Each structure stands twice: as C-alpha cells, then as structure tokens.
C-alpha cells in the first residue's frame, strides 16, 4: 500500500509499528451533522483501512470526537442548548451517517470529555519540562498555558511547515484562521499554540495540575492518538485544512512528551465545494449525508459518488452526481446478478493494485465499469467491490 505523505511530499509505502498499521484520523467537532466534506475524508481513510486489512495487515484505527472545543460551546450558547446534549445528538447523527455509508468503525472512538484527565496531566508534564509556560490571564482564575515550540524545534523534533510546507505568510494566515493568537502578550513566540485555557466564568472547565480549565484542540488529539495507538503512529490523517496548525502542533506536542517523531505518514484528503462555492456553515450550503438519505438516496450511491473523485483532489459536488452514481450502481448490480464463479482473478488483482496506488478509486471504478460491461462477469469482483470499495452489489 502506497500513500502520499504530505510531510515528504512523496508517495511512500505505509509502514507498520510492531506489525500493526496504527491509523489516527482527526474526528469531528459535533455541532453540525456530517456533510459531504466530512464524508469524503472518512470514506478515504475507510478505503485505506479496508485495503490494508485485505492485504493482510492488521490495522489499529483511532478517531476522536472533539467535544471540548470553542465552536461547539459557541453553537450551544448561540442556540441556547446544553453543550453536552448538542454534542451527544450530533455524535449520534455522525455515527449513524457513517454506518449508512458502511464506514467500518474505528477500533477506538474517543470523546475528549471522557478522557479529559489525560490531556490535563500531559499539560502538567509539559510545564514541568518547561515546554509549557503560563501567560498572565487577568480575566481568569489561573493563567492560560502555551506551548514553547522553539524548545521542541531546538531538539530537532519540529520545524515550522514540516507537514504543510507553507511559506511564513501562509503559516501566519492559517494560524489565525484556526483560532491562533499570534499577538497575545506574554507569548514566547508568535506561533506558540494554546495548551490549556484557564477557566472563565460560564465556561465548562475541568481540574488539572495547572488549575481549572480545558485543553487546547491540538493537545487533545496528541494525547488521544498516543493513548490509543502508542507513542509513534503510522499515519496521522484528516482533511487537508488540518495540515497547519493542527497536525504540525499535535505532532510537536506528542514529540515534546515522548522525545520521538510522532508519525511516519501525514495523509490528507481534499476539500469539497458545492456547485461553485466553498461548502460552509456560514454560507448555509452544507450538503448533509443524513438529508440525502432521508430524501431517499441510496447511501451506496453517495459512497460511490464520493469515491469517484480521487481523495487528494479538491472537487465540487453537483446534485447531478448522485443520479450518475445511482445509474452506475444499477449497472454494477445487474452485472453482479448475472455473475458466475470464475478462476480468472486478474481484474480483481488490478482493482487491488489501483487502490494500493495512493487510493486511486477513480481508476478502481473504471475497472469495475469494464467488469460490469462483460457478458459473463466473474463473481469474484462482486466480493472484492464489497470488501475494498465498501459497496454491496
Ligand atoms: Zn486532530
């Protein structure tokens, strides 16, 4: 299995750790249900997990639910609902969407609020090592804690842009876009990320060695990933917008704690627009999986429509895609219905090779189209499409 590595900017074989492919995919913040952008990311890495398992590699897959995070609290406040109820309802909806799309559930599926003591303790350890430092915070009981990136950089375990390859101006833009505060007084360096936010009145908070508060987003993922999978993971994955600051900072936190590089591979899925416009909550143009399913669309057609795009591309969703995918699915199912056992396995082998080549699902789909056009298609392909593409014919 070869996968593009954002860090090296090359196609590289997926490596295992102690014989196991340890996969961490950043999960949702549960305040809006699954839109096609989320679906595309989780379908890409579901395809990766399927391909690895089919080739005989054991996979350990962990994913978090970012249910302790500013956007969730802001949404709960704005709509006057309890944040825990909102998180639970949206987490349930996400899981039912994933089940409808036949995404194989992660082995560890970790809600931040269930393990909060772990990032809290980790922040304490980072402060002990002078990798975390307090910044005066007059509006809170205690102080906010920031992470000293330069200290990890000095140990050779971090370099700005090592995943994103952004130029300095772009690093600055992305840092602010994802809630970073480059100009905060008292920080040692511009891009030092927040490790621990001291409790403010009316905000959810938890105890920690550095006082009451809550963890920053990056340290949540660093601790959940290493807690579930071990100090070194095979693949850190997620949407492409997570390269910086999120994946670089998570890796820096983990390395600060372990003294080792965090991941062998950084894999990223492209971003999805809707009919010419960026899909976003503020524009109100999210295409939700649950709504498509409720409108009577076959989830297998949604899955097929998404997989017909290469996972690394940015692409646009047009409503007509679903009709095209449904028609293709009908053709495939008709072929499956007339398929016969056959000793000929070359088409299935080619399908495996397409997916093993950086998850080339568009090529895989063309091969299944060729199979479906045959007079007497082999039944082996039906099994392979189920196992590798997650589509039952
Ligand atoms: Zn994450």
Image (cartoon, helix red, strand yellow):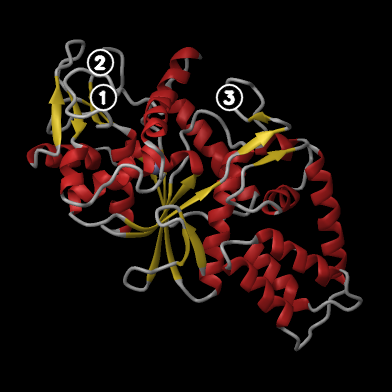
Return the disc, 3 or 2, that comes first in the chain's sequence.
2
- Residue 390 visible in the displayed image: no
The residue lying at 52 percent from left, 31 percent from top is 89
Please determine whether, in this image, residue 305 is positioned above or below residue 387: above
Question: Where is mark 2, residue-wise?
Answer: 200
**What residue would you read off at disc 1?**
205
Disc 2 crowd rating (10 Å Cα; few below 14, some 14-19, many 20+) is some
Dot 1 lies on which element? Answer: loop
Q: Given the current orientation, which residue lies at the most extreme right position? A: 375
Q: Residue 99: horizontal and vertical position, in percent?
A: 60, 49
Quadrant assignment for ligand 1: top left
Category of crowding for the residue at label 3, using alpha-carbon neighbours closer than 10 angstroms: few (below 14), some (14–19), many (at least 20) = few
Labelled pair 1, 2 in contact (Cβ < 8 Å): yes
* 278 vs 67, nearest the viewer: 278
Inter-mark Cα distance, 1 to 2:
8 Å
Name which of mark 1 and mark 3 comes first in the sequence: 1
Mark in front: 3 vs 2: 3
Q: In the shown orientation, is residue 134 left or right of residue 345?
A: left
Which badge, 1 or 2, comes first in the chain's sequence? 2
Looking at the image, residue 310 sits to the left or right of residue 220; the answer is: right
Q: CA–CA distance between discs 3 and 2?
A: 27 Å
Please say whether residue 25 is visible from this viewpoint.
yes
Q: Point out residue 29 in the picture as x, y percentages from the top left corner.
A: 46, 34
Quadrant in the picture for residue 152? top left
- Looking at the picture, does residue 364 appear above or below residue 182? below
Quarter occupied by residue 173 = top left
Q: Which mark is residue 281?
A: 3
- Please state which of the two labelled residues, at mark 1 or mark 3, is closer to the viewer: 3
Report which quarter residue 180 is drawn in. Answer: top left
Residue that appears at 79% across and 51% down = 325
Where's residue 174, x and y in %? 42, 31
């Amino acid at each position: 299995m070869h996968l593009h590595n954002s860090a090296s900017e090359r196609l590289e074989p997926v490596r295992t750790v102690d014989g196991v492919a340890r996969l961490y995919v950043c999960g949702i913040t549960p305040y809006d249900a699954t839109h096609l952008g989320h679906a595309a990311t989780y379908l890409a890495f579901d395809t990766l997990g399927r391909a690895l398992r089919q080739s005989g590699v054991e996979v350990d897959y962990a994913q978090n639910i970012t249910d302790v995070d500013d956007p969730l609290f802001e949404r709960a406040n704005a709509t006057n609902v309890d944040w825990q109820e909102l998180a639970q309802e949206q987490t349930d909806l996400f899981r039912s969407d994933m089940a409808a799309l036949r995404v194989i559930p992660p082995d560890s599926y970790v809600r931040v609020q269930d393990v909060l003591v772990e990032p809290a303790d980790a922040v304490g350890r980072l402060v002990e090592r002078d990798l975390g430092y307090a910044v005066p915070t007059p509006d809170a009981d205690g102080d906010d804690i920031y992470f000293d990136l330069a200290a990890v950089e000095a140990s050779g375990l971090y370099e700005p842009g090592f995943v994103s390859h952004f130029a300095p101006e772009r690093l600055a833009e992305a840092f602010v876009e994802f809630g970073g505060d480059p100009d905060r007084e008292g920080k040692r360096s511009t891009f030092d990320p927040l490790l621990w936010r001291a409790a403010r009145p009316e905000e959810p908070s938890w105890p920690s060695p550095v006082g009451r508060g809550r963890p920053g987003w990056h340290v949540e993922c660093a601790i959940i990933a290493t807690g579930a999978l071990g100090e070194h993971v095979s693949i850190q994955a997620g949407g492409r917008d997570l390269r910086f600051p999120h994946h670089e900072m998570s890796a820096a936190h983990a390395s600060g704690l372990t003294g080792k590089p965090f991941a062998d591979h950084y894999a990223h899925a492209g971003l999805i627009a809707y009919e010419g416009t960026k899909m976003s909550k503020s524009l109100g143009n999210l295409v939700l999986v649950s709504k498509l399913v409720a409108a009577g669309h076959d989830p297998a057609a949604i899955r097929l429509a998404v997989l017909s795009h290469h996972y690394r591309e940015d692409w646009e969703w047009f409503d007509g895609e679903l009709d095209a995918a449904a028609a293709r699915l009908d053709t495939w199912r008709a072929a499956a219905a007339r398929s016969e056992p056959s000793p000929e396995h070359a088409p299935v082998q080619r399908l495996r090779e397409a997916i093993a080549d950086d998850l080339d699902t568009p090529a895989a789909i063309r091969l299944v189209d060729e199979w479906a056009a045959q007079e007497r298609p082999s039944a082996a392909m039906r099994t392979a499409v189920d196992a590798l593409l997650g589509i039952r014919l």
